[in-house]
Image (spheres, rainbow, N blue to C red):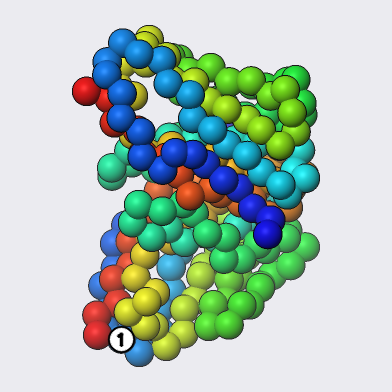
């Protein structure tokens, strides 16, 4: 069953702690993406990777970090430097200019 | 810089009505255009991908059209049902990561 998995679905952290969100795909896609979605706002691109061991900053990369050691995996770390980390985080992947697919999302709450 | 606009931001229709959602983009140099659906608290589900060489694409009760020269795409939903209630987003596919509109929130009233 091909697709994108994100874990966990809900995540709660205390302010000042780093937290890592998981994203795994078995679609054999080269490119992977991380987005943030806030209520009433559109999707905002955090980081993306078009190939293993390479990634680029998106529009709102400050306070986030990523790695791409395997084609299937693109974890996102939300660091304590991110001022407003509470949000819904979505991972996506695609091959070339074909359809982009999204995971189910992780809702992060930081108190 | 590519900008994508979706109008209206919200739409409420009675069940059974045919409806059209609009998407416009500023740079016609695109490869494809993709329509998505998002239910509250969920990820985005791909509905249709229109390649730049195509003018329309159909899937069930959905029909999407693309006019690159005018920078417009429409998503036509026939015989709307309450289960169609969701937010619909369009995204332009180019050399860069997808550029998304902010979506149209659709409510279909039974």
Residue B91 lies, with reference to residue B75, above or below; the image says: above
Name which quarter of the figure residue A80 lies in. top left
**Whole-percent x and y of residue B9?**
32, 57
Name which quarter of the figure residue A56 lies in. top right
Q: Residue at x 35, y 52 (%)?
A: B41
**Whole-percent x and y of residue A86?**
30, 29
Q: Residue at x 66, y 43 (%)?
A: A25
**Whole-percent x and y of residue B107?**
29, 71
A52 sits left or right of A47 in the view: right
B46 sits left or right of A69 in the view: left
Q: Is residue A80 visible?
A: yes
Q: Is residue B7 visible?
A: no
Could you tell me which secondary element the residue under label 1 belongs to?
Answer: loop
B105 sits left or right of A35 in the view: left
Residue A108 or B58: which is nearer the viewer?
Answer: A108
Q: Which residue is mark 1?
A: B15
Image quarter (top left, top right, bottom left or bottom right) of the C terminus of chain A:
top left
Q: Residue at x 74, y 28 (%)?
A: A70
Residue B83 or B58: which is nearer the viewer?
Answer: B83
Residue B1 lies, with reference to residue A98, above or below; the image says: above
């Amino acid at each position: 069953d091909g697709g994108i998995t994100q874990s966990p679905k809900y995540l709660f952290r205390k302010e000042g702690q780093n937290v890592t969100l998981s994203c795994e795909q078995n679609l054999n896609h080269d490119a992977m993406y991380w987005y943030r979605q806030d209520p009433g706002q559109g999707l905002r691109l955090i980081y993306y990777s078009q190939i293993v061991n390479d990634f680029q900053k998106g529009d709102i990369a400050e306070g986030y970090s990523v790695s791409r050691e395997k084609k299937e995996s693109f974890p996102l770390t939300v660091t304590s430097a991110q001022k407003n980390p509470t949000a819904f985080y979505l991972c996506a992947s695609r091959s070339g200019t074909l359809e982009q697919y999204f995971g189910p999302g992780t809702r992060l709450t930081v108190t | 810089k590519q900008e994508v606009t979706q109008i209206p931001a919200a739409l409420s229709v009675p069940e059974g009505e045919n409806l059209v959602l609009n998407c416009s983009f500023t740079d016609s140099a695109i490869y494809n255009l993709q329509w998505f659906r998002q239910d509250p608290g969920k990820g985005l589900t791909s509905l249709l991908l229109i390649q730049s060489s195509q003018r329309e694409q159909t899937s069930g009760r959905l029909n999407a059209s693309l006019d690159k020269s005018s920078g417009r795409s429409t998503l036509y939903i026939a015989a709307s049902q309450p289960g169609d209630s969701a937010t619909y987003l369009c995204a332009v596919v180019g050399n860069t990561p997808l550029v998304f509109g902010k979506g149209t929130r659709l409510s279909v009233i039974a």
